[in-house]
Every structure is written in structure tokens, then in C-alpha cells.
Amino acid sequence: MSDQLIAAAEPGGTTPPRPRWRRVAARAWREARAAATQAVLIVAVFAVVGALCGLLWEALWTPAQGGVVKHHWYPLSWYAWQDTFFAASAWYIVIGAAAGLVLGALVAWRLDRAEMVSLAAVVIGGVVAALLMRTVGMHRGPGDPQVAARSAADGATLPSQFTAPSWWLLTVFPTGALASLGLFFITIGKHGAGSTHETGVQPPSAG
């Protein structure tokens, strides 16, 4: 018995293999940690892109001009003022849908370690991106001209307010991301699926 302990303690001794449950637990922990890192990365990328989309949304929108009369703001053109409401929502849809489609495809292409984790992260990230896009755009855009007109001189020109889109439009960003993610998984499949790198099986030769 003492000889066996001495042999195991010596540098040249044979180290007994770890129990199977420890190997399984270590592998599960590595996979869970990798999946969590992937999810955090996806949400972070969506958040950054959502903020950038908010800046782009506000930059592409053109306000209507109005004048101040007795500390009240009046649009110079009622038609142009009404068009700004439609333009704000239209640009939000176009930018949010395009960004969502691109991000969903990128996630499916490069971050496909765990499909269900990717799916959940895309949903969360899409909602976060939509909220950040709306918040950043509204913060950057001009505020209520009636408030500014209270302290403005008669004849001053002020831009119209950057109108917020309807709350249901917040679904555009995550819906676009989910659409491209699902389409990629259905039509192309997991990245590298069926390749020799994944399976280790060489394709049969032509001969």
C-alpha cells in the first residue's frame, strides 16, 4: 500500500484518471460559459448598433420650420409639418429593419455555438437595440417648439419636434433580426455543418 502511494506521488508515477462525472461537469461548465459569453456579446453588439442607428435616424430626418408669433409656434407649411410625422416613422422602420436583418444574419453566420442561446440573445438584443435607437434619436432631435417659443422673440424660426414613432414599431428591429436568423438556420444551417472539420469524416473519393 505504501509503495503504491509513493509511486503515485513520484514525478514518474501514474496519475489516476478523473472520475467521469467530473469530466462531464467540466465540459458542461465550459459550454455554459462559452454560451453565456456568446449571449453577452450578441446583446452588446445589438446595443451599440441600436445607438448608432438612433444617430442615423435623427440625421436622416428633416424637421419642418415654423415661426414664433406672440410666444406661440406656428408651422410655415402645414403639409410639411404633417409629413414629418410620417417621415420619422418611415425612417425608423427602414433603418431598424435593415439593421436587424444584417445583425441576425451575422449572428447566424458567426455566433452559432448554441442556437437556442443565439435565439434568446437576438430577441433581447433586438428589443434593447430598438429602445436605444428610439431613445438616442429622440434625445438628439429637436424638442417641442411650443416650449422654446415661450422665451423666443416674435419672428424667430424654430424647427418642429422630432416625433416619436408608435410603440409597436419597436418590434421592427427584433423582428428583422429573427427573420434573417431563422432564414439562415433553415436554408444554410449551422456554420460548418457537414464539413470535414466538424465531423472528421473525409468525403468519399470520386474513384
Image (cartoon, rainbow, N blue to C red):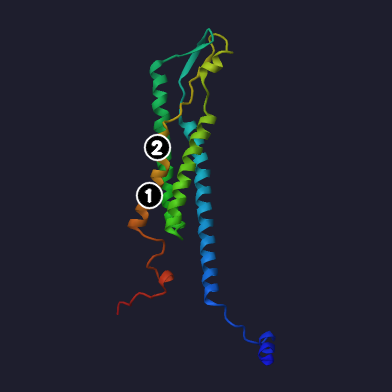
**Between 109 and 144, the one nearer to me in the picture:** 144
- Quadrant of the snapshot with the C terminus: bottom left
State how far apart marks 1 and 2 are (Cα): 15 Å
Q: Residue at x 62, y 86 (%)?
A: 14
Q: Please give the label number shown on residue 63.
A: none
Element assignment for label 2: helix
46 is higher (above) or lower (below) than 37: above
Q: Residue at x 49, y 31 (%)?
A: 58
Residue 97 lies, in percent from the top left, at: 40, 41
Residue 88 lies, in percent from the top left, at: 43, 29
103 is higher (above) or lower (below) than 93: below
Tag 1: Cα neighbours inside 10 Å, few (<14), some, or many (≥20)? many
- Quadrant of the snapshot with the N terminus: bottom right
Q: Residue at x 57, y 10 (%)?
A: 153
Residue 200 lies, in percent from the top left, at: 42, 74
**Between 104 and 19, the one nearer to me in the picture:** 19
Residue 81 lies, in percent from the top left, at: 42, 19
Element assignment for label 1: helix
User: Which of the two discs, 1 and 2, labels the residue nearer the N terminus?
Assistant: 2
Of all residues shown, which one is farthest toward the front?
Answer: 1
205 is higher (above) or lower (below) than 103: below
Q: Please give the label number shown on residue 94.
A: 2
Tag 2: Cα neighbours inside 10 Å, few (<14), some, or many (≥20)? some
Identify the amino acid type marked 1: Ser
Q: Please give the label number shown on residue 180.
A: 1
Identify the amino acid type marked 2: Val
Number of marks in the rendered image: 2
Of all residues shown, which one is farthest toward the top?
Answer: 70
23 is higher (above) or lower (below) than 3: above
Q: Are marks 1 and 2 in contact (CB under 8 Å)?
A: no
- Residue 112, by quadrant, is bottom left
